[in-house]
Amino acid sequence: MHLNASRFFVFAGLLTAPVLALAQEETPSEEASAESALSEATGSNHSHTALTFGMHSHSFSVDTTTPEAPALTVDIEHYWTPHFTVFGGGHLSVGMKAVGIQAGSRLYLGDESFQGIFLGMQAEGTLFERNEWTSGSQLSFGGHLGYAQKLGERWLVSLAAGADISLTRSETRAPHTLTPECILFTPCLLAGDRSEPVVEETEAVRPFVRLAAVFRF
């Protein structure tokens, strides 16, 4: 399985997301200033979009090469109603052995979106490599309960905990070994390793935690 391209794009997003957030905060546009003035005049202070970047983990072990390893995440969260938002983004494990996408929604129980207590639901798809012989994919769906605390005009910090149900499918191919016959006869070398991969499917219920910084704009 070749994940180099996916790793590159997700890693680039993880690097550029904080930079873009800081740049937008330092150089507000005229349109943003006008919207801020209108919000103050009308008494409403609803941000329509938020950029979230943080860490999501099912395990505290950084060395693990499974999708349970801590992963860096980037999400775009969009205001749908005063209390309901939808989001989507990507994630990359700390060891760069797993990459994937996620999407979901959150229901905020306070007076304003993006802050206070919230309930969320999320679906994830992940591709991973344990080593050169074992690779696989994972699908999961779960929910979480969290709280977002406002730190400034646009910045918040969010902490959530929950659980999901996952279906993991992995394939393991036996390492190809050269026998004396293969060394002597070229047709054997050209045939390669015809052994069937060992396929394993597992289901699990996994708790997780998520810590993130949120930038509203």
Image (cartoon, grey):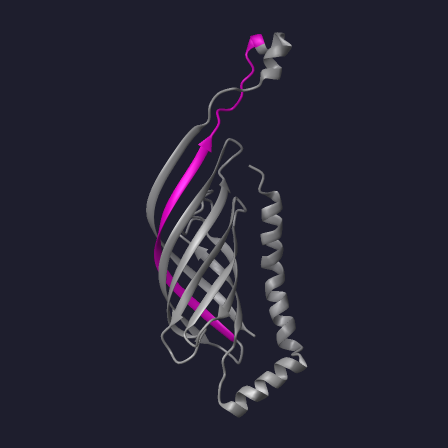
Which of the two residues, 6 or 82, is positioned nearer the viewer here?
82
Q: Residue at x 38, y 43 (%)?
A: 167
Q: Is residue 112 left or right of residue 24?
A: left
Predominant SS along the magenta part = strand
Q: Quadrant of the C terminus?
A: bottom right
Q: Is residue 150 left or right of residue 29?
A: left
Q: Residue furthest left?
A: 205
Q: In the picture shown, does residue 42 fall above or below 69?
A: below
Q: How many marks?
A: 0
Image x and y of residue 83, in percent: 41, 74
Which of the two residues, 100 or 98, is positioned nearer the viewer here?
100
Q: In the picture shown, does residue 193 fall above or below 162?
A: above
Q: Residue at x 58, y 88 (%)?
A: 37
Q: Quadrant of the N terminus?
A: top right
Image x and y of residue 140, in percent: 40, 50
Q: Residue at x 60, y 63 (%)?
A: 17
Q: Is residue 94 left or right of residue 16?
A: left
Image x and y of residue 123, in percent: 42, 54
Image x and y of residue 48, in percent: 52, 74
Q: Residue furthest front?
A: 81
Splitting the image into 4 quarters, where does residue 81 fall? bottom left
Q: In the picture shown, does residue 198 fall above or below 32?
A: above
Q: Residue furthest bottom?
A: 41
Q: Tell whether position 163 is magenta.
A: yes
Q: Tell whether position 85 is magenta.
A: no
Q: Which residues are magenta?
A: 155-181
